[in-house]
Amino acid sequence: MRLFEVIKIGKESITEGISPVVYHYMGIRDAESVLKQNKFRLTASAGTGAEQALQKGDRMYYLSTTRHKLGGYHIDNSWSGVVFELDGSKLAQNYAGQAVDYWGPEFYGRPGGKGPEKKEAEDRVYSYKPYITDANKYIKAVHVLYDEEGQKRFDQLAIDVRRLFISAKRLGVKPYLYTSKQDWLVQDTRKAVNPSTVPVIAQASGKEKDSKKTYNTYSRRHLAPWIELYMAPVGANISKLADKVRYNYILYGYSDSHQTLASEIHNAKAKPADETGLDTLLKIFRKEKINSPKEYIELLYNKWKPKDESINEYKEVAHDTDEGDGNIFGYVVDTDEVQLVNYFVTNHGVSESIIDKISQKYNTVAILKNINVDDEYRNQGHGTELMENFISESVENGAEAILLVADTLEDNDFDLVKWYESWGFKKVAKTGSGPFMVMEL
């Protein structure tokens, strides 16, 4: 097997394969976990179109590494972190790899983009499986940064540094500790320090068996219904959550439901496999020879669609922000159609008598199923833009009112119900997910 080959493109050249030495960055706690378990958890590529475009065949997992010590991914790190120095030659014996430029050359140097010095110089290592096991076979050294500022701000990490050093030595891996960022970046091992000479680490001696900080985990329930709909025979009794997904995303939200699934995968992919079900989902992808959430939705739709193909009439209303950092989805439907009962009575437990009153008062309504803005883009007017577009299109399609269930079970850094009330929505009834609300147009 050839380790790598150089492909010339114009005056530039890139390395195809895995470079002889590569580097992988992560936080101290995650790095300690890698050494304790002796395996790297890989990232799944199924969550976004950009990652799928970089996928190599049906190898759905990858490890991002950089070809040089000053890779753009970790050069801005301020006070702590770990760089694994890896043997690319050995990795290439068991894994496929290639050089990738995630951002693309046009991103570097333009206003608002990254400067040329921030290039990540990424060599991506691909695998069919979610882990690289026997990690110590590939680790040449572990370089740990824990500078004075980090020691002052996060002394709890001192215990993790001790654990990391203990785990590394048990694996026969050489760890180095730096209290200077510059020494850490260039990996000047002559400047590495003995952990016992750092007061905050020395004081942590004997605390290695203390219970570790608990992590917020991503609930398995988000992906479980998508998997259940694949596993369960048509006609079988399925869970309430799976039935909700079947109605909301497979049958009646079909056109953009792949975005919802892609978001679920994206949120799950960095978490432990046994907490999310992601690995089970990707095994289904491989078995069915599909590579994207959209193809999976099509698979489920063809399985669960009504035998006579006669889904009741409705008009979808969906909008995305220009940058793709938010979206809103719902539909306009006549009140004598089955969607009204299916969505609010069957899925959310709204009283049939309330829905009967809605049907008597209005001939056509809009159902707002979902509005989402990525956390980092909130408070920039995107939610307002999406709601204005939804209201406008609902009116154009004859809706006399907009109905929704304000999902108060989701974590939000603002009061969702009050936000809806600011638009004119009124609380009509309680449901298990949150208040059923109506705004007359």
Image (cartoon, helix red, strand yellow):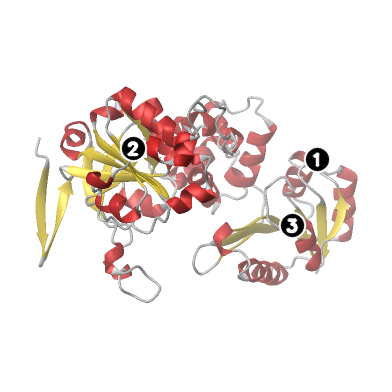
Residue 128: quarter of image: top left
Tell me the residue that label 1 is attached to: 349
Q: Which residue is drawn at 53% across and 40% down?
A: 156
Q: Which residue is drawn at 84% across and 61% down?
A: 362
Q: In this view, does 15 lie to the left or right of 426?
A: left
Q: In this view, does 395 lie above or below 254?
A: below
> Of label 2 and label 1, which has the lower sequence position?
2
Q: Which structural element holds mark 1?
A: loop
Q: How far apart are marks 2 and 3 (CA)?
A: 51 Å
Residue type at numbered disc 3: Leu
Give coordinates of residue 440: x percent, y percent.
Answer: 83, 66
> Of label 3 and label 1, which has the lower sequence position?
1
Q: Residue 416 carries which label?
A: 3
Q: Is residue 230 left or right of residue 36?
A: right
Q: Which residue is drawn at 40% across and 46% down?
A: 81
Residue 223: quarter of image: top right
Give coordinates of residue 4: x percent, y percent.
Answer: 12, 44
Give coordinates of residue 94: x percent, y percent.
Answer: 21, 31
Residue type at numbered disc 1: Gly
Task: Kindly tell me whether residue 230 is visible in this rendering.
Answer: yes
Q: Residue 194 carries which label?
A: 2
